[in-house]
Image (spheres, rainbow, N blue to C red):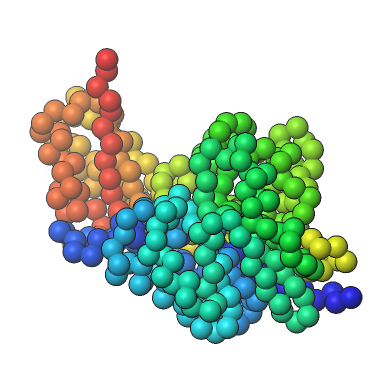
Amino acid sequence: MSREKIHILFVADTHLGFDLPFRPRVARRRRGHDFFANFERALEPAFAGEVDLVVHGGDLFYRSRVPEALVEMAMAPLVKVADLGIPVYIVPGNHERSWIPLNLWSIHPNLFIFDEPKTYLYEIRGVTLAISGFPFTRKIHDEFGDLVVQTGYQSVQSDVRILCMHQTVEGSQVGPSDYTFRNGPDVIRGADIPDVFCVVLSGHIHRSQILIRDLKNRALKAPVLYPGSVERTSFAERKEGKRFALLDVSPDGSSRGRLINVQFIPLPARPMVTLILMTKERSEEEVFSSLKERFKELEADAIVRIQVVGSTSEEIAQVFTAENLRRIAPSSMNVSVTYPRSPG
Ligand SMILES: [Mn+2]
C-alpha cells in the first residue's frame, strides 16, 4: 500500500474587503490591502506548486453582501491556483452562507464549493482522498452528526478522509484573556467529532490553534485545526500571531488515513496598540501635544485605538476629530478613538 503523503494548504478567515472602500471619501491608509497581501502570501506554496490541494475554511469576505468587483479580486488568486491544476475547496462561512454568486465560480473544473453537505473525491498519485464538508450552520450543537452523515462520506471508498467546516468546537479559545467555548447551541461537542476523518479543518475561530482534547480531557477522535484569520480583524486579536497551515495526510490502510504533519506558517500582522489618554483637568493644547508625543513612541505601521479617559468637553473632542487625527498621526498608522461610556 502506498505511503504517499498528500500536502494540503489550509487558509481561512481572509475577510477580504475589510476596510477597502472602492470610492474612498478621504485618502488614508486602508487596512484592506494587508488582508489581500496576506491572502496572497498564504497561497504562495500553492503558486509554487508545492501543495496538492488548497482548502479555504470560510469567511473569504468580510461580510455577506460585497460588490462584484471585490468578488473578482478575491477569486483571482484562487482561480490562479486552480488554473495550475491544484484543486481549491471553499467552505462558505457565516459571511457567505447563502451567497449565490460564489457558486458561479463552481463551473471551474478545479474550484469546489461546499454550498451544501457533500463529499468530493480527489485521486492523486494513487491515493483517493475524500474531502467532505458543509457550509456554516447556525445552532449546530444537535445537528452536527446529521450534517456529517449528509456529506455522504460513507458511500465512497477512500484512503484518506478529511472534513472541512466553519464552526466553533468545544475548547477553542479566542481573545486576550483566552475565552474558551464550552457549550451552547453554536458549539460542537468534542465528543461528537466522529472517528471517520483523520483531521477536521475549520475556519471561524480567528486564533490559530489545534484541538486534540475536549474539556474533560478526553482525546478527540480527530484533531480539529484552525489556521486562524490572516490579519487581525479586531483588537481582541492583538496578541495573536497570524498564520495559515500546511499539513500532510497519508493512507494508513483504513479509509480515514492519518494526519502526519502540521505546520503553522506565520504571516506578518500589524501591531495593535491601545493608547490611553487622560484628559481630566487638561487643556485642549495639553491633550493635543501629549497625543503627538505618544504617536512618536509607536511603531510606524501601528493600528492605534485611542481610549479617552476623563472629560470629553467639546474643546477636547475637537482634538479627536478624524480630520485632526489624520493631520497629527503618521500616515502609515490607522487610528480610531473610543470615548468612555457616560455613567448611568
Ligand atoms: Mn471570520
Give the x, y percent position of residue 326.
19, 53
Residue 317 in the figure: left or right of residue 12: left
As rendered, which of 3 and 331 lies closer to the eye? 3
Give the x, y percent position of residue 50.
64, 79
Tell me if residue 64 can be seen: yes
Q: Residue at x 44, y 53 (%)?
A: 97
Residue 247 in the figure: left or right of residue 77: right
Q: Vertically, is 336 above or below 338? A: below
Give the x, y percent position of residue 52.
65, 76
Q: Vertically, is 184 above or below 335? A: above
Residue 146 in the figure: left or right of residue 221: left
Give the x, y percent position of residue 130.
70, 66
Q: Vertically, is 185 above or below 2? A: above
As rendered, which of 150 and 185 lies closer to the eye? 150
As rendered, which of 45 and 154 lies closer to the eye? 154
Q: Residue furthest left?
A: 315
Q: Where does the N terminus fall, quadrant-wise?
A: bottom right
Q: Residue furthest bottom?
A: 84
Q: Residue at x 57, y 31 (%)?
A: 184
Classify residue 244 by image quadrant: bottom right
Tell me if residue 210 can be seen: no
Q: Residue at x 27, y 18 (%)?
A: 343
Classify residue 191 by image quadrant: top right
Q: Where does the C terminus fall, quadrant-wise?
A: top left
